[in-house]
């Protein structure tokens, strides 16, 4: 019994329980919800948000907040597709390498500015978001790219675990990419010195510096890898929508941050997990799909996002207060 109570105190367990209850309720109201085709479509449609959330999780754990990642993704996808359409054919591997280089450099700029000027990350990234997005619009004049290289189709259309007799229904390759990335970053955060350094910087930057952690190197890694992750998400996004629209991604920042906070990451830093973040994204995807199936206005989705963010912050605050009380009790007892 005590073990069950301990498990239920974890945010991941609570989220999993909420998802199970929501799935039961929605499937009883909309029988076509719990079909293999619908589930795989839900996962595919939220893969981009899921990939974005992995980078933002690391930023939040480190004690920062990044709102420029969508602008980075927007610049990366336009630059890569434009170059591949006009200068050489390439392939999906070259497209991904180009994206990673550009995204990483843009992320490193964020990290350098945050460390060098010692300013809140949200202020710097608001500035760089406007800079990146503004330059994109000035240079492109908002022109859409209606054509993308044909090999982008193969990335989004590839499927595994297809249904017998219907190869069009199955788990998308881009969804598998998201899950593989989540597994790798989970190992990184849990079992490496670098991962523990990110948590410690988020908990107490001064203490981290005193024990010899390289603050500059870790900061550059966090924001550089977030830029790289945003680049991967941008290529996945292009492969799914098959067009490049300069304003199609910017504006999703709050949804991604909400999913990460919902998954148990503390907005003040030092706390969070990949498993919780993935569950947070899944909860958002199920909510969105259920509104569609139940024919509820999509405007309610923004209401749910706001309510979820507020609820997550309150839960985090209550948990932190309880932890402090427990620490005080232990100290008094000793």
Image: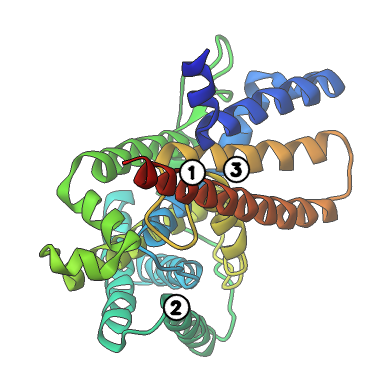
Q: Is residue 260 left or right of residue 269?
A: right
Q: Residues within 10 Å of mark 3 (few under 14, many from 20)?
A: some
**Residue at the location (81% across, 40% down)?**
291
Q: Is residue 268 above or below residue 262?
A: below
Give me the disc on residue 170. Answer: none
Q: CA distance from mark 2 to mark 3?
A: 26 Å
Earlier-in-chain disc, 2 versus 3? 3
Contact check, label 2 and label 3, Cβ < 8 Å = no
**Residue 275 drawn at (x, y percent):** 44, 36
The front one of 98 and 299 is 299
Residue with the mark numbered 1:
277
Q: Is residue 292 left or right of residue 193?
A: right
Residue with the mark numbered 2:
125
The front one of 36 and 194 is 194
Q: Secondary structure at mark 3?
A: helix
**Residue 186 drawn at (x, y percent):** 32, 39
**Residue at the location (73% across, 28% down)?**
22
Find residue 213 and report its image quarter: bottom left
The front one of 201 and 294 is 201
Q: Residues within 10 Å of mark 1 (few under 14, many from 20)?
A: many
Residue with the mark numbered 3:
45
Q: CA distance from mark 3 to mark 1?
A: 16 Å
Contact check, label 3 and label 1, Cβ < 8 Å = no
Q: Is residue 94 left or right of residue 172?
A: left
Q: Secondary structure at mark 1?
A: helix
Q: Is residue 113 above or below residue 6?
A: below
- Number of numbered discs overlaid on the protein picture: 3
**Residue at the location (50% across, 67% down)?**
70
Q: Is residue 152 above or below residue 66?
A: above
Q: Quadrant of the C terminus?
A: top left
Q: Residue furthest top?
A: 164
**Residue 249 drawn at (x, y percent):** 57, 64
């Amino acid at each position: 019994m005590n073990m069950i109570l301990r498990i239920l105190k974890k945010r991941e367990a609570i989220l999993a329980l909420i998802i199970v209850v929501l799935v039961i309720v929605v499937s009883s109201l909309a029988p076509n919800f719990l079909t293999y085709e619908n589930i795989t479509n839900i996962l595919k449609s939220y893969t981009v948000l899921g990939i974005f959330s992995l980078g933002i999780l690391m930023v939040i754990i480190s004690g920062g907040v990044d709102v420029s990642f969508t602008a980075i993704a927007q610049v990366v996808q336009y630059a890569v597709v434009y170059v591949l359409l006009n200068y050489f054919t390439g392939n999906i591997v070259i497209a991904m390498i180009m994206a990673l280089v550009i995204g990483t450099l843009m992320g490193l700029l964020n990290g350098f500015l945050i460390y060098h000027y010692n300013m809140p990350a949200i202020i710097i990234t608001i500035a760089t978001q406007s800079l990146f997005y503004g330059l994109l619009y000035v240079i492109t004049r908002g022109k859409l790219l209606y054509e993308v290289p044909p090999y982008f189709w193969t990335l989004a259309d590839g499927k595994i675990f297809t249904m017998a007799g219907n190869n069009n229904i199955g788990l998308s390759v881009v969804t598998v990419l998201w899950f593989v990335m989540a597994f790798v970053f989970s190992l990184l955060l849990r079992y490496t010195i670098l991962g523990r350094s990110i948590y410690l910087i988020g908990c107490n930057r001064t203490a981290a510096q005193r024990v010899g952690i390289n603050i500059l190197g870790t900061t550059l890694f966090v924001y550089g890898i977030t830029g790289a992750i945003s680049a991967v998400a941008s290529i996945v996004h292009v492969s799914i929508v098959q067009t490049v629209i300069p304003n199609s991604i910017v504006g999703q920042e709050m949804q991604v941050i909400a999913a990460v906070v919902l998954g148990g990451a503390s907005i003040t830093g030092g706390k969070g997990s990949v498993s919780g973040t993935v569950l947070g994204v899944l909860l958002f995807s199920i909510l969105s799909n259920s509104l569609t199936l139940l024919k509820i206005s999509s405007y309610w989705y923004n209401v749910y996002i706001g309510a979820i963010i507020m609820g997550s912050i309150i839960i985090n605050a209550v948990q932190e207060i309880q932890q402090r009380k427990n620490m005080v009790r232990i100290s008094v007892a000793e």
